[in-house]
């Protein structure tokens, strides 16, 4: 059987016919063509959206290609796809029987753990006796798959065994009961409804469901997932007797580490308090964790229970007042105020025990409460000194030193191949290979560790494109071949290709040029190595490197020089006077330095040179190289930040939609330069992420345009998923430039800080707060620009205002109180109908900061906005307090 014949079978026949034809071919004969089938699957199924559909083979039935994979590949090869496909039109058990495959159990074990959503596709393998059903958590995760409650599950197995594991298995990733029931399609049954129906039909024990839901809550699952179990317990509507029978369970949940679970338990304890009150001492002891809760709701509810208990039993008033002081640990001034109110009501501030406890919190409460608590505690009234402003911590540039020798170069390259998180170390490593590559290439024994490890990483680089780039670079050097040849080999197998429009594609092209130069026998530094920790290339450094290339008779690589020009520092250009123009590379450098030069013929090189000029003025000679106007290719890009609130059809859910339209638009199908500020959106390509999907990729990308980085920050705004929480959130890489010297914060960059400050993932929002403090303190970001950016998001109503309140609080605690006051004051400049929800917390923060600093609102627009704010509650309370500060001063 020839390769062409086998490919013809799976590309021209329907799935069932292809299966019959493949079954007639000997397994060993089929196996010979595994790589060819994998290439066809990659090109025409997995990455079909990136291919020109008018060229090459066009499979008649994609399921036939998938069956071809099963007929030719091993399971380990299928795993390298990242997602093991299964045919939809032919039962999988028929595929295994016809092809006489002996790895059904291995596939079942793997997919149950790796992709529980596929359980519905592979269940026939154990139902038909070809495999045994695993009893791992993955089986339960399969039930949690979206809309799985509507599938034809084995109800006998579910009701007798699996359902009780729902209360033991939390879930993983997007697979959880909480996610299932939240995103189930309208008209479809939730798991909560189904289980309650089973209980009402007598098919599940109601009492056991009540206990099992409390068991789950005691396991302290993650907050989002734990919420399903508390809602399910509430939906079961336990009676007063059922609640009383579980008194100890509810009291125990008051110490949960999950705030909503504490709130849930408090509701049932409150119900018990009305019907069959808990013994006072026992209740006060159980309430201690809730009284000290960080969340405002549980703390206030616990204080109310303490108050009601003390009213019933006056003998415990002192203990109750002491318990109330525990809530002074809260960071919320409202909770602190309620705690002091309760101590006053109980008239126990004369108790030495209570006064001693109050004294412990004198310096911890909000500035507006310090005088009051000091008087209650009988201590001297001392106004806490304002928090010191952070010193202007302007990052200073430190020189980036190249590696000193071949052995150091090899060691550093091996280090970054394993962990390429530091982009400066990556650049030093590549530069080291560039400087000492000829010496290393001639010493096979020394290169042996790199050859082995680069080959391993190349087969499985993980999610980081930069590791694929570095492994291909290492392999090409060790094997004495081009990266282009290796790339064709590896991407024709089972691995995801590096997208043409990504910045890692530019990185790979730069490294490819370097390897080809080394193989020709010339070692030189790369042109694009940053000169210092700002990430820029100094003009005199680039001039010197180009002179080295000229002296060695070497032609600078287009990708390397383009990247060097994109990184070219904007300062100290006058110190380079001698700018020869004997080659296109030298002409491009001279043009970037502001000199006149003959333009062309390489478009991407001249686009980079144009980007490096200061200032960027339109140049039709550059535009003519492209045949049309392209953003930042001879004509300045114009961007605008748009933020809108979008809602689901029924209005149950809303989310933020951020767009950054750019002019002129890219048209056509060609990708001109990976560093252009947008990606091609023509017929052949879907929009892709220039900067990558991992922290290492994004961090390296942050060095692509260190001196003019709106390109980078545009991607940062489009890339963020504000509700996503990740173990190693890659979007933190977009905040790296704020901690580098020589970086001027543009409006788009300020938009990134404003947006990231409101991200659900604390690892991102806390870093954004630190970045904002840094650039506000050293003057690179003005309060006006930052406030305008925050207002763009806040007035859209697409994110909770409390997110920015928390962010501003973190900034104030870091020493930026004055800046926070100024920014919030500038935010308060909108029409009454634009007033965002949850503004009260921000007004309270502003009030406390003014009290602490001994200042007051003075800006006329701020005072007018405060006067016009609609509504009552905390908004009215603190708008009045802020205005009264000004009236009292007058």
Image: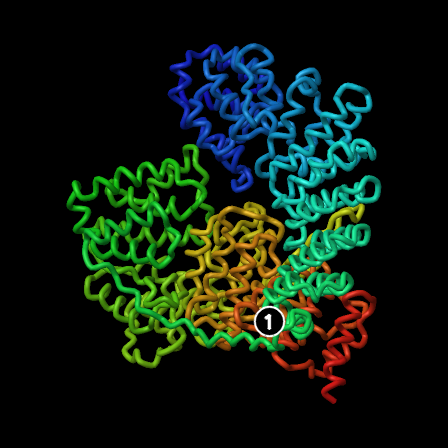
**Front position in the image: 37 or 538:** 538
Q: Label 1: which residue?
A: 786
Which residue does the image show at 71% across and 55% down from the upper left? 320
Quarter where residue 128 is shown: top right
Q: Residue at x 65, y 37 (%)?
A: 217
> Is residue 824 visible from the viewing direction of this image?
no
* 327 lies above or below 450: below
Q: Is residue 824 above or below residue 456?
A: below
On the image, which quarter does residue 325 sit in? bottom right
Q: How many marks?
A: 1
Camera-side residue of 362 and 768: 362
- Chosen colour scheme: rainbow
Residue located 44% across and 69% down the image: 707
Count neighbours of disc 1 (C-alpha within 10 A) and say few if under 14, some if 14 to 19, many if 20 or more: many
x and y percentages locating residue 270 in the rendered image: 78, 45
Mark 1, secondary structure of its residue: helix
Q: Position of residue 638 (x, y in %)?
A: 58, 68
Q: Position of residue 370 (x, y in %)?
A: 65, 72
Comparing 818 with 23, the one in front is: 818
The quadrant the N terminus occupies is: top left
Percent across and percent down for residue 698 are 46, 54
Q: Nearer the viewer, residue 567 or 835?
A: 835
């Amino acid at each position: 059987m020839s390769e062409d014949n086998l490919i013809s079978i799976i590309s021209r026949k329907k799935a069932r016919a292809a299966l019959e034809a493949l079954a007639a071919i000997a397994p060993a004969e089929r196996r010979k063509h595994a790589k060819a089938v994998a290439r066809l699957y990659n090109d025409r199924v997995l990455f079909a959206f990136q291919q020109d559909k008018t060229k090459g083979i066009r499979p008649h039935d994609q399921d036939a290609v998938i069956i071809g994979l099963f007929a030719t590949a091993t399971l380990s090869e299928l795993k390298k796809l990242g997602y093991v496909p299964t045919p939809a039109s032919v039962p999988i058990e028929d595929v295994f029987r016809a092809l006489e495959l002996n790895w059904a159990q291995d596939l079942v074990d793997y997919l149950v753990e790796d992709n529980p959503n596929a359980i519905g596709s592979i269940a026939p393998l154990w139902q038909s006796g070809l495999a045994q059903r695993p009893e791992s958590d993955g089986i339960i995760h399969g039930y949690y798959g979206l809309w799985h409650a509507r599938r034809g599950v084995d109800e006998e197995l579910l009701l007798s065994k699996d359902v009780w594991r729902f209360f033991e298995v939390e879930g993983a990733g997007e697979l959880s009961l909480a996610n299932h029931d939240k995103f189930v399609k309208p008209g479809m049954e939730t798991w909560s409804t189904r289980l309650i129906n089973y209980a009402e039909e007598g098919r599940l024990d109601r009492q056991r469901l009540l206990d099992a839901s409390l068991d789950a809550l005691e396991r302290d699952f993650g907050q989002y997932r734990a919420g399903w179990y508390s809602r399910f317990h509430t939906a079961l509507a336990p009676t007063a007797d059922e609640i009383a029978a579980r008194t100890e369970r509810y009291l125990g949940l008051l110490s949960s580490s999950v705030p909503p679970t504490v709130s849930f338990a408090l509701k049932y304890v409150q119900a018990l308090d009305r019907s069959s009150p808990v013994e006072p001492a026992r209740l006060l002891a159980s309430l201690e964790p809730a009284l000290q809760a960080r969340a405002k709701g549980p703390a206030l509810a616990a204080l109310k229970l303490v108050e009601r208990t003390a009213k019933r039993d006056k003998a415990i008033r002192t203990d109750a007042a002491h318990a109330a002081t525990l809530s002074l640990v809260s960071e919320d001034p409202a909770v602190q105020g309620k705690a002091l109110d309760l101590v006053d009501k109980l008239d126990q501030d004369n108790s030495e025990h209570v006064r001693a406890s109050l004294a412990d919190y004198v310096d911890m409460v909000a500035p507006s409460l310090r005088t009051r608590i000091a008087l209650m505690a009988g201590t001297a009234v001392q106004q806490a000194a304002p928090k010191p402003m952070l010193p202007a911590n302007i990052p200073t540039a430190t020189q980036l030193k190249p590696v000193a020798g071949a052995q150091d170069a090899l060691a550093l390259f091996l280090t970054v191949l394993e962990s390429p998180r530091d982009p400066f170390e990556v650049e030093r490593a590549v530069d080291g290979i560039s400087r000492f590559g000829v010496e290393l290439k001639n010493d096979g024994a020394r290169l042996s560790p790199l050859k082995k490890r680069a080959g391993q990483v190349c087969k499985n680089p993980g999610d980081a494109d930069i590791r694929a780039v570095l492994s291909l670079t290492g392999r090409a050097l060790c094997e004495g071949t081009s990266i282009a040849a290796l790339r064709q080999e590896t991407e024709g197998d089972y691995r995801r290709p590096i997208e043409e429009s990504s910045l890692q594609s530019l990185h790979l092209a730069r490294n490819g040029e370097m390897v080809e130069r080394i193989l020709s026998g010339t070692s030189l530094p790369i042109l694009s190595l940053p000169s210092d920790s700002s990430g820029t290339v100094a003009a005199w450094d680039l001039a010197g490197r180009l002179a080295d290339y000229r002296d060695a008779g070497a032609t600078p690589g287009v990708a390397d020089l383009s990247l060097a020009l994109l990184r070219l520092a904007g300062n100290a250009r006058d110190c380079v006077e001698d700018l020869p123009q004997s080659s296109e590379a030298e002409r491009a450098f001279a043009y970037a330095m502001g000199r006149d030069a003959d333009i062309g013929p390489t478009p991407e090189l001249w686009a980079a040179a144009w980007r490096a000029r200061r200032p960027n003025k339109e140049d039709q000679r550059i535009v003519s190289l492209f045949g049309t106007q392209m953003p930042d290719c001879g004509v300045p890009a114009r961007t605008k930040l748009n933020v809108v609130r979008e809602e689901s059809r029924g209005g149950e859910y809303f989310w933020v939609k951020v767009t950054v339209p750019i002019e002129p638009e890219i048209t056509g199908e060609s990708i001109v330069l990976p560093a252009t500020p947008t990606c091609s959106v023509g017929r052949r390509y879907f929009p892709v992420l220039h900067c990558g999907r991992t922290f290492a990729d994004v961090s390296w990308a942050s060095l692509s345009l260190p001196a003019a980085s709106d390109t980078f920050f545009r991607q940062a705004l489009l890339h963020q998923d504000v509700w996503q929480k990740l173990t190693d959130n890659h979007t933190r890489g977009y905040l790296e430039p704020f901690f580098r010297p020589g970086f001027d914060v543009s409006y788009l960059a300020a938009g990134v800080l404003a947006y990231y400050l409101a991200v659900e993932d604390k690892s991102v929002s806390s870093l954004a707060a630190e970045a904002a403090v840094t650039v506000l303190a050293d003057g690179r970001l003005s309060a006006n620009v930052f406030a305008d950016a925050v207002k763009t998001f806040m007035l859209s109503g697409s994110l909770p205002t409390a997110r920015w309140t928390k962010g501003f609080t973190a900034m104030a605690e870091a020493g930026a109180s004055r800046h926070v006051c100024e920014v919030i004051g500038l935010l308060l400049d909108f029409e009454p109908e634009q007033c965002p929800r949850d503004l009260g917390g921000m007004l309270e923060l502003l009030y406390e900061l003014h009290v602490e600093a001994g200042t007051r609102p003075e800006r006329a627009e701020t005072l007018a906005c405060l006067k016009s704010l609609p509504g009552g509650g905390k908004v009215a309370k603190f708008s009045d307090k802020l205005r009264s500060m000004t009236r009292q001063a007058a």
